[in-house]
Image (cartoon, rainbow, N blue to C red):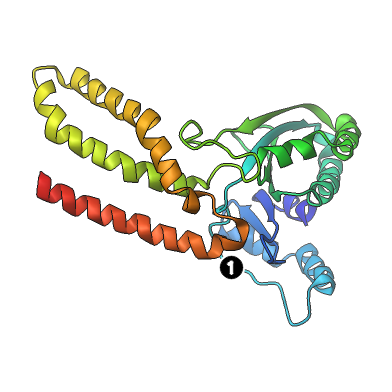
C-alpha cells in the first residue's frame, strides 16, 4: 500500500496506527498535495486491487471505512524521527524495505504506529516517525537483532541517514514514567493553562503596580521570570500529583477516566474565570 501510494502524483505521506487496548481496528492515514491527487489515488487500479486483497483479512461483517483523518494521537507516546537520503534509483526498493521493517516493528510491545513521508521541495530526504508507548519499549525495538539485520539490508539503498528522539513540549514539567511514558500532549497543555492562568491573573492584580515604574520590557521579563519559576518548582509538581489519575490512567480505565477528567478541568477553568472576575 505504501509503495503504491508513494508512486502516485501528489503523494505526501502514509501513516499506520494500530488498534489500542482491546480494539483490533487499524487505521491508515494518507496525505496528498490536493484534492485532485487524492481523487486520482482513489480511482487508481493499484488501490482497488489492494483494497480487494485486504478484505480477505478482515473480520466477518466488517469492511474498509474511509473518512477525513481524525485526531489519531490522543494517547501519549514517544517518537523516534529518522531522516533517510535514498539513492535516486533505489526508491522502489526502499519502499519495499520500509514495508518489511514496518511488519517487524509492528510485532513489538508498545508499538503505536509509523509515518512515512516522502521528499518535498523543502527537503530532499524521506522522513520516518516511529511511535511507541514508552521510551523503554521504543529502545527495545531500536536495539533488537531484527532491526539491526533490517538496517544492514538498507545500506545499499541509502546515501545517509540520521535518527533523533522527539522531545515532549513540556518534558521538564511532566516527567516520563518508565512504563507508561509521558501524558498526552493535549492533557499537558490543559494542565499548564489551568495553573498558569491564576498565576498571571495574580501578577496583574498584585505585581503590576510594583513593576509600573519599570519600562514595559523589563516589567514583562520580571513577570515571566516569576511565572516560570512558580510553575517549575512548587506548582507543576503539585498539579502532577493531584491530577495523576487523569494524566496517566491505567489502560483499562482510559476511556472512562479521560472524559471525566477533561470535564473536571474544563469546570475548573470556568471556576477560575468567575473567581478572578470577582477579584479583579
Residue 95 on image: x %, y %: 81, 45
Regarding residue 69, the answer to whether it shows in the image is no
User: The residue tagged with tag 1: helix, strand or loop?
Assistant: loop
Residue 57 on image: x %, y %: 83, 70
In the depicted structure, whether residue 107 falls above or below residue 21: above
Which image quarter: residue 135?
top right
**Callout 1: few (<14), some (14-19), or many (20+) C-alpha neighbours within 10 Å?**
few
Question: Where does label 1 land, which residue?
Answer: 67
Q: Nearer the viewer, residue 275 or 162?
A: 275
- The residue lying at 78 percent from left, 38 percent from top is 140
In the depicted structure, whether residue 140 falls above or below residue 75: above
Residue 236 on image: x %, y %: 40, 36
Regarding residue 37, the answer to whether it shows in the image is yes
Say which quadrant the N terminus sits in. bottom right
Label count reads: 1
Residue that sits furthest to the bottom in the current view: 61
In the depicted structure, whether residue 141 falls above or below residue 99: above
Say which quadrant the C terminus sits in. top left
Which image quarter: residue 217?
top left
- The residue lying at 73 percent from left, 42 percent from top is 137
Q: Nearer the viewer, residue 60 or 84?
A: 60
Residue 238 on image: x %, y %: 39, 39
- The residue lying at 56 percent from left, 42 percent from top is 182
- The residue lying at 74 percent from left, 82 percent from top is 61
In the image: residue 221, left or right of residue 264: left
Amino acid at each position: 500500500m505504501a509503495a503504491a501510494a508513494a508512486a502516485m502524483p501528489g503523494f505526501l505521506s502514509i501513516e499506520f496506527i494500530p488498534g489500542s487496548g482491546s480494539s483490533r481496528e487499524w487505521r491508515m492515514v494518507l496525505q496528498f498535495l490536493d484534492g485532485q491527487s487524492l481523487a486520482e489515488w482513489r480511482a487508481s487500479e493499484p488501490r482497488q486491487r489492494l483494497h480487494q486483497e485486504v478484505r480477505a483479512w478482515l473480520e466477518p461483517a466488517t469492511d474498509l471505512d474511509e473518512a477525513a483523518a481524525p485526531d489519531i494521537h490522543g494517547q501519549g507516546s514517544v517518537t523516534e524521527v529518522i531522516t533517510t537520503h535514498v539513492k535516486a534509483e533505489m526508491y522502489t526498493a526502499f519502499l519495499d524495505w520500509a514495508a518489511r521493517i514496518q511488519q517487524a516493528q509492528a510485532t513489538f510491545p508498545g508499538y503505536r504506529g509509523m509515518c512515512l513521508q516522502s521528499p518535498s521541495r523543502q527537503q530532499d530526504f524521506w522522513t520516518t516517525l516511529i511511535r511507541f508507548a514508552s521510551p523503554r519499549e521504543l529502545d527495545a525495538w531500536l536495539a533488537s537483532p531484527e532491526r539491526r539485520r533490517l538496517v544492514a539490508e538498507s545500506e545499499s539503498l541509502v546515501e545517509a541517514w540520521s535518527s533523533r528522539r522527539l522531545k515532549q513540549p513540556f518534558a521538564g514539567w511532566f516527567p516520563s514514567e518508565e512504563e507508561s511514558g509521558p501524558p498526552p500532549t493535549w492533557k499537558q497543555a490543559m494542565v499548564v493553562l489551568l495553573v498558569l492562568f491564576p498565576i498571571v491573573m495574580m501578577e496583574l492584580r498584585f505585581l503590576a503596580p510594583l513593576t509600573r515604574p519599570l519600562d514595559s520590557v523589563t516589567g514583562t521579563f520580571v513577570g515571566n521570570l516569576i511565572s516560570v519559576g512558580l510553575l517549575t518548582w512548587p506548582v507543576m509538581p503539585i498539579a502532577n500529583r493531584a491530577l495523576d489519575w487523569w494524566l496517566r490512567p491505567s489502560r483499562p480505565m482510559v476511556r472512562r477516566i479521560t472524559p471525566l477528567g477533561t470535564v473536571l478541568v474544563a469546570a475548573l477553568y470556568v471556576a477560575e474565570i468567575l473567581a478572578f472576575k470577582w477579584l479583579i
